[in-house]
Amino acid sequence: MSYLERTKKSMELFEKARKHIPGGSAYSIRYFEPYPFYVSRAKGSRIWDVDGNEYVDFWMVHFAAVLGHGYRPVIEAAKEQLEHGAHFGWCNEWEVKWAEAVCRWFDVDMAKPANSGTEANMYAVRLARAYTGRRKIGKMEGGWHGGYDGLHKAVNYPYDKPSSLGLACVENIVPLPFNDLEATIRIAGKEDLAGIILEPVLGSAGVIPASEEYLKGLREFCSRRNIVLIFDEVITGFRHPGGMQNYFKVKPDITTIGKTAGGQYFAGAGGICGTAEIMSLLDQVERPEFWNRSFHGGTYVGNALTMRAGYVTINELEKKSGEVYSYINSLGEYGRRRIMEVLEENRFEAYVTGLLSMIGLHFTREKPFNGLTAERTKNRELSRKLFNHMLQKGIVYQRPETPHFAVSTAHSMDEMERLVEELDTFIKKERG
């Protein structure tokens, strides 16, 4: 049965949505042709649409659901907190417990919650400017840090095109080539930068890890020039104990987090953490004059529901660290190895990237090591064909043009093998 035949309710919802939601979806990346399916429920590694179709989910709440959909300790804590109150507009004990857990996880001095990863990055950039007295921020080509104007440049290829209509302040953004230390230092060295922000694993461009040499060289350069180094760990912060900074043994000045830190599923999920020297610029007690501190706030910042869900999630990951990470990392490694075997056996030109529990697949003519190499020779038509093939087989991920997959504790070896087998079937079909 075709997608159109199986998803008639989704088609009806999309037609209604187009009348009231621009583009028919709350977030444009969730759209694909001819229309997206609409999810009604999720559990473990599976999601179900409004027509009752079941899918193996490798998107996992934008890579956030390390513990899978509907993880019971988090859900039970949230249900209990709803009875007490989700948001009070006042301080609550869970924001304190959450901050302690975040500081413990990343081995940092201080933390503040934010409403999203976008907000966290916005406040981190502002902090870097407040600390250094400079304005310009370096960010990576292909790096995605949310919809904030101050970082919304060189997001999508071609990188010289505006990343959105209506942007301002982009003249203070300096695009840098990820994983090319010599070029990064050459470009950044000509600018008076307040900070450099990057994902240790480039997400939107297709799960491309930084090299250890690159991160260490960048750390040394920033320290020498008094530039604030910011790691955006919104996706990666809980994909390894202590985040990717602990994996690579490179310490940033500020870390931004989101998604998982808010309990995987709940709104108001984000945060910034770092050294007391920099974070103290947010301190209204030590800096009572508003003009003498960096502003941070928001109506839902630190709401009890998100803070409690986030605290429970981090606590669960701490308690079960060995079990959780050995499992999801071994499954991710198995998936990358098997995908590479399929490509080699079929003599098919494509490349696998990723790290730990994250996998990227690239239909390119060169092995990608940054945003430019992941995009300039990409076969977008082939990527979309694969997406449609997997969709027809009940396997889903984001995005159609950039296949990447997140593994959770809820995924099984059988599901990973199913993904690999369907890739093999697809490639054989394409080769004729």
Image (tube, helix red, strand yellow):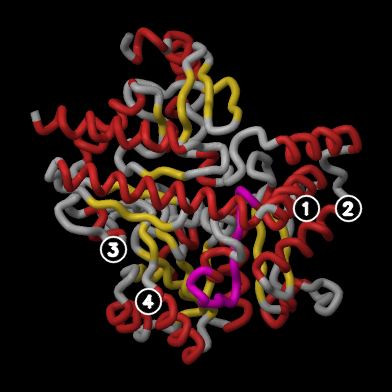
Q: Which mark is residue 302?
A: 1
Is residue 26 located in the magenta-colored stretch of the structure?
no
- Secondary-structure class at tag 1: loop
* Amino acid tagged 2: Asn
Is residue 255 located in the magenta-colored stretch of the structure?
yes
Left or right: where does residue 129 sit relative to residue 375?
right
* 245 shown above or below 187: above
* Amino acid tagged 4: Tyr
- Residue 418 at x, y percent in the picture: 37, 31
Mark nearer the N terminus (3 vs 1): 1
Q: Nearer the viewer, mark 3 or mark 1?
A: 3
- Residue 194 at x, y percent in the picture: 51, 79
Is disc 2 in contact with disc 1, using a CB cutoff of under 8 Å? Answer: yes
Instruction: Identify the residue at image location x=53%, y=70%.
Output: 245
Disc 3 from disc 4: Cα separation: 11 Å
Which residue is identified by label 2?
A: 92
Instruction: Identify the residue at image location x=43%, y=86%.
Output: 221
* Amino acid tagged 1: Gly
Is disc 1 in contact with disc 4, using a CB cutoff of under 8 Å? Answer: no
Instruction: Identify the residue at image location x=33%, y=70%.
Output: 179
Give, as a single range, the part of the protein colored magenta: 247-260
Q: Nearer the viewer, mark 2 or mark 4?
A: 4
- Residue 393 at x, y percent in the picture: 35, 22
Q: Sort mark 2 into few (<14), some (14-19) or many (20+) by Cα contacts within 10 Å.
A: some
- Secondary-structure class at tag 4: helix
Which residue is identified by label 3?
A: 369
Disc 3 from disc 1: Cα separation: 37 Å
Left or right: where does residue 335 sit relative to residue 273?
left
Disc 2 from disc 4: Cα separation: 41 Å
Which residue is identified by label 4?
A: 214
Residue that sits furthest to the right in the current view: 84
Mark nearer the N terminus (1 vs 4): 4
